Each structure stands twice: as structure tokens, then as C-alpha cells.
Image (spheres, rainbow, N blue to C red):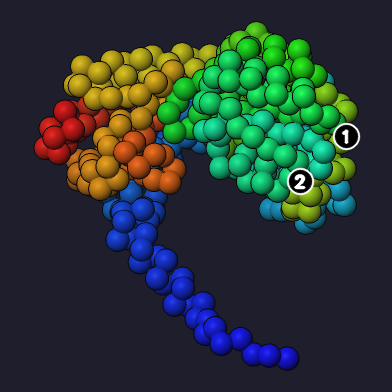
Amino acid sequence: MAQSNVKRDPRSFLRLEYDRLVSEDLDWRIRILASSSGPWTIVSGKKVLMLCSNNYLNLTNHPKVKRAALEAIEKFGAGSGSVRPIAGTMQAHVELEKALAKYKRTESSLVYSTGFAANAGLIPQLAGEGDLIISDELNHGSIIDGVRLSRAERTVYKHRDAEDLKRVLDEAELKSYKQILIVTDGVFSMDGDIAPADDIVKLAAQHGAMTYIDDAHGDGVLGEAGRGITSHFRIEGKVDVEMGTFSKAFGVVGGYIAGSADLVNYALNKSRTWLLSGSHPASVVASCKAAIDVVEHEPEHLKALWENTRYFKAGLGNLGFDAGASETPITPVIVGQSSTARKMSEMLFDENVFALPIVFPMVALDKARIRTIMNSGHSKADLDFALQAFGKTGKALGVI
């Protein structure tokens, strides 16, 4: 057998690629929390105001959520010991899925290890060879990876543009696709804007297409009692697959899908990220169920979140910052270049404000930003503290 003349050095490749990321200000620089994730936390040895956590409703610290985990450990132990289809489905998992379906007002639900696992495992099973997947051009990376794993044809439509979606669907009618799947985020994580889900379900119905909405950032935030985007647009029961997560507003971890019993039966038999992943410990599952109960029966958390969101957005606008088209507690402070975003984040940290930069390729090259996320536990004094720091650093860098 002929020998290749190519000399490969895997370690050198890894170092060179990392060095390139560093030189272009595109590397992640991890900071470590030394306390719980709350409105204020300990990072790198100092107390800082948290503005970059997805812990919208501050439920990571809610007594009921923490107590549920402790009680579940005593009853069920530290781990499940198996994957769900073999010996890893505990009574706690069943109770969570029943509570989740009731909360989402769907027939059934299924819990995955993460939201990413739900997207990566289910999307490829819903559309394959001879099918078409239509995706919003700014969908989350987990959706993009799920689409790439499918053998279906794929195309994109302009961001949040129902007219362009209609064009794509009309063109698809000229071909003989077996299934058409429309996939979109509900709330887009980089800009905080909302998909026109009501228009999407209307177009889908007209063309016999299946709808899949990733509501990770709408859970606990939008709609009645935080039920999400279907409640927000009053389209409950009209979305074929509602996908969500427990790692954001619910304050724990885990992904899920909600919909018909047929959907759940299909997913638990076909989705390998569910079939082949170890199940959550009962402590996690019990905390998720407790979080649903808190969101549903303690409306003060959601009310405070939106009050803080409106106050902070107004403050940024008064200072002259560009917060883009955000409609949600995700509020980007757009500064332009990646290097500017990096420097501003460092300066904010010096001012005891923890807010991270989002840079290319997560956003466009000239749209680097500090992405801030509100928390229901922030006080007005906290937000004034943050606004003062943003004003100081923004002026120093010439952003405002």
C-alpha cells in the first residue's frame, strides 16, 4: 500500500487554530462562579452583578426548587443508573412529564437531557430523504446541527419574514416532497426578538407542513403564567412540536418536547439522543417539576422580570445605546467590533458588572455586542448600578 507524503501533527493543528481564535478576539475566556447563580454572584474572587445568566426568574435559588431536589435524593438516590428506555425511567420522570404537558396544555411531553439533545435528536427523525426542512436564517446552532444531521433537503427563509416563508413554501409545492418541516426559534437568543409564530402556523396549515418551535427563551417568560410562545400568540394546539428547556427560566437543566401523544410515542422510539442518553437524576427532575409549580402559582416573579426589562431597556436608550430589535428580557448592547465588545466586558467587570461579549461567528462581524439578560431578582438599585457602569464604559470607548 502506498504511503502518503502528508505529515500530520494533530497537536500542532489544535494549537494553531486556538492561537488564531485568540489573535482575532474570537476565543471564549471562561470565568468561574464561586457561588450560586443569582442577581449577585462571586466570580474570580469578587462580588459582581449578574447580567449574563439565563436564570430569568431567579428560580435556581427558590426554596421550593432546592428542597425538591434534596427530598428526591433521599428517596431515589444520586443517579438513575440507566437510559430511559431500559431502567432509567423513575416515577419522578413520569410525574414531571405529566405536569409539563398539563402546564403547556398539550396531550403529552417527553424530557431530554438538554435542549440541544432534543433538537439534535428529533429534527433528523422528523424529516429525511425526500422531505424538506425550512429554517429561519438566524436559528440557534442546535437547530442548525439538527438540520445538518437530516438527509432531507434544506432551505432558509429571511429572518422573521413570513412573506419570504410563503415564497419558499409556494416553491416547495412545485416539487413532490413527502413531508415539509418548518423550524424556528420562538425567541432568538442573540437579539431577543420574537418569531411571527401566528403567521407561521397559518402558512403551515395552508401547505400541510409540520411546525417545530424551539421555545427555550420563551419558556417562563412569554404568555399566560409563562407558558411560552403558543400562549403569547394564542395558538395553543396549533404547533406540532413545542421544544423547550429547563435550563433558563425554570432555573434547572434539561430539554423537552410537548405535543400530541403520537409525537411523544414517535420521538421515544426514534430519537437516539433520548434513547441512548442516561436519564436525569431524580433530584434534577423533581426540581424541574417544582419550578413549573412556582412559575404557575407565583406570578410575582414574571411580573418583576418584565418590570425590570422595561426599566433597563429605557435606561439604555436614555444613555444612547443601540439595543437592536429586542422584545424580551434578552437585551443586546450592540457596540460593533469584537475587540470593542471584549474591552467593554472587561471594563464592566472592573466596575463589578458581569456581562459577556457575543462576537463573530455567533453574530455578524460588525454586530458584536454585550448581551444582557434581566433577572426577576434584580432590584431597581441593581439596575441603576448597571446603567451607571454601562454609561461610564460606553463613553470611555466612544460607543455613546
In the image, residue 169 lies at what x, y percent?
70, 22
In the image, residue 31 lies at what x, y percent?
36, 53
Q: Secondary structure at mark 2?
A: loop
Q: Is residue 300 above or below residue 87?
A: above
Q: Is residue 13 visible?
A: yes
Q: Is residue 51 above or below residue 28?
A: above
| Residue 228 placement: quadrant | top right
In the image, residue 364 lies at what x, y percent?
39, 39
Residue occupying image coordinates x 52% and y 33%: 138
- Callout 2–callout 1 Cβ contact below 8 Å: no
Q: Nearer the viewer, residue 386 or 29?
A: 29
Q: Nearer the viewer, residue 140 or 117?
A: 140
In the image, residue 341 lies at what x, y percent?
27, 42
Q: Looking at this rendering, what residue extends furthest in the left direction?
A: 396
Three-letter residue code for mark 2: Arg
Three-letter residue code for mark 1: Asn
| Residue 230 placement: quadrant | top right
Q: Is residue 362 above or below residue 203?
A: below
Q: Residues within 10 Å of mark 1 (few under 14, many from 20)?
A: few
Alpha carbon separation for disc pair 2 and 1: 22 Å
Q: Looking at this rendering, what residue extends furthest in the front direction?
A: 174
Quadrant location of the N terminus in the rendered image: bottom right
| Residue 264 placement: quadrant | top right
The number of callouts visible is 2
Q: Residues within 10 Å of mark 2 (few under 14, many from 20)?
A: some
Q: Which mark is residue 170?
A: none
Residue occupying image coordinates x 75% and y 41%: 152
Q: Residue at label 2? A: 151
Q: Residue at label 1? A: 265
Depth check, mark 2 against mark 1: the one in front is: 2
Q: Nearer the viewer, residue 235 or 248?
A: 235
